[in-house]
Image: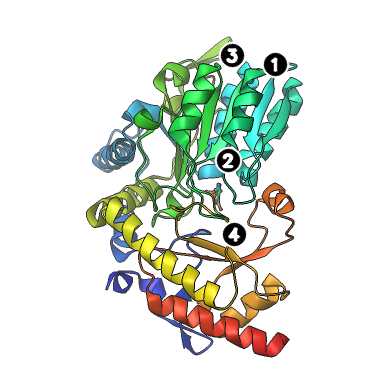
Amino acid sequence: MIADQFPALNQKVNNRELVYLDSAATTQRPKRVIEAINRFYQQEGANVHRGAHELSRRATDLFEDSRKVLAESINAESREFVFTKGCSEAINLAAYSWGLANLNSGDRVLVSTMEHHSNLVPWQLVAEHAGASVEPIPVTDDVLLDLDALEAQLKKGAKLVAVKHVCNVSGTVNPIKEICLLAHEHDAVVVVDGAQSLAHCAVDVKDLDADFYALAGHKAYGPMGIGGLYVRWSILKDMKPWQGGGGMIRKVSFDGTTFAEPPERFEAGTPNVGGAVGFAEAVRFIQDLGIETIAQEERVLNKFAESELSALGIETIGGDPNKAGILSYNVDAIHPHDFGTICDQFGVAIRAGHHCCMPLMKRLGLAASARASLGVYNSKHDIIVMIEAIKEARKIFG
Ligand SMILES: Cc1ncc(COP(=O)(O)O)c(C=O)c1O
């Protein structure tokens, strides 16, 4: 069983076997990822790019090899892949480097209504600075992006489109290729929030034709505190640094400073080398299982969960027929936090709340929802235990 490879899953919570259904918040990590990180700290543990010694050389090789693995996994070049501490930081990099230099007074930034706050708030901050406006791209009741509306908005002129690949509330898989084509026809760049995609679907940034693509290691079986930003080279090569410090310079003097080439230009300070090594190992783990196999098995489990919920009269949010394994729902009028507490008593870990998507929740007329999200370690048994918790919640709350 795949679950056996994940040490944190092998425990009891509230005297019940743990059922982990919170992978959209963060996935658990397989032993091989934890071991790869441990190995780095036990065998190298040195800083990169600076020491004239063996351990530093090995650390540098591991760091750059990890970059190569990650870049190749999304069909990018190594020089196009900047390490960040997560997906939020990756989008902030895009906003504070590209956005500050390119957004001007009167420019329009189009952000989908289903965006996570991480792909909305940075644009609001930078747009305010530039005197630009941020406008929502509408979504349908089924949480599908309204492409006709987007086209009409683009026709009026826009500098940038910000959209997520996989929705962390509804599991919607957005048609990124189509969106990029539309945006490029109207000279807008596209920033894709890929936080939820690596663990659920294949990503090929060249095929999608994305300009920016942001990633998080911890949502794809990797460690927390590491992520990455892909930027098309023709854009990245001219971008200005957004943070200063060691590692990102060519020459420094009080008369002025010149900067290293990308990606180092955007990696000030000591990087998270152990995190990068763990992230690359997580991607190898996904590759060994095969992303198409993962996606197919997840669709089957998702359908099973939806039919079990539907048998109880519970519908999930979002109508994408190819949705990723993310099930958001409400149990009658029971507050999702109360329902979450009952799940916890059954050893079932779910998330309850607005999922950092307040504009989407408002669009759907909801304050909050419960969310069960799947990973490679989940099985029908996990869904059945969650269904038991729903029945118990109904008993308790009438
Ligand atoms: C769609 C989406 N974007 C961005 C983020 C933020 O990612 P990170 O925690 O790596 O900054 C999340 C995390 O929940 C997410 O689901």
What's the CA distance linking mark 3 and mark 4? Answer: 57 Å
Residue 202 to residue 191: above or below: below
For the residues carrying marks 1 and 3, which lies nearer the camera in this image? 1
For the residues carrying marks 1 and 4, which lies nearer the camera in this image? 4
Q: Which mark is residue 145?
A: 2
Given contact means CB atoms under 8 Å apart, are the residues at marks 3 and 4 in contact? no
Residue, disc 3: 254
Given contact means CB atoms under 8 Å apart, are the residues at marks 2 and 4 in contact? no
For the residues carrying marks 2 and 3, which lies nearer the camera in this image? 2
Question: Please, what is the three-letter code of the amino acid marked with disc 4?
Answer: Ile
Residue, disc 4: 317
Q: Residues within 10 Å of mark 1 (few under 14, many from 20)?
A: some
What residue is rendered at 53% in x and 77% in y? 311
Given contact means CB atoms under 8 Å apart, are the residues at marks 2 and 3 in contact? no
As helix, strand or loop, the secondary structure at mark 3 comes to loop
For the residues carrying marks 2 and 1, which lies nearer the camera in this image? 2
Left or right side of 204 for 12: right
- Quarter assignment of residue 390: bottom right
The answer to which of 40 and 182 lies nearer the viewer is 182
Question: Please, what is the three-letter code of the amino acid marked with disc 1?
Answer: Asn
Q: Can you give x and y, in whole percent of width and height, for residue 70 in the image?
A: 33, 40
Residue, disc 1: 104
Residue 61 to residue 299: above or below: above
Q: Earlier in the sequence, mark 2 or mark 4?
A: 2
As helix, strand or loop, the secondary structure at mark 4 comes to loop
Question: Please, what is the three-letter code of the amino acid marked with disc 2?
Answer: Leu
Q: Earlier in the sequence, mark 2 or mark 1?
A: 1
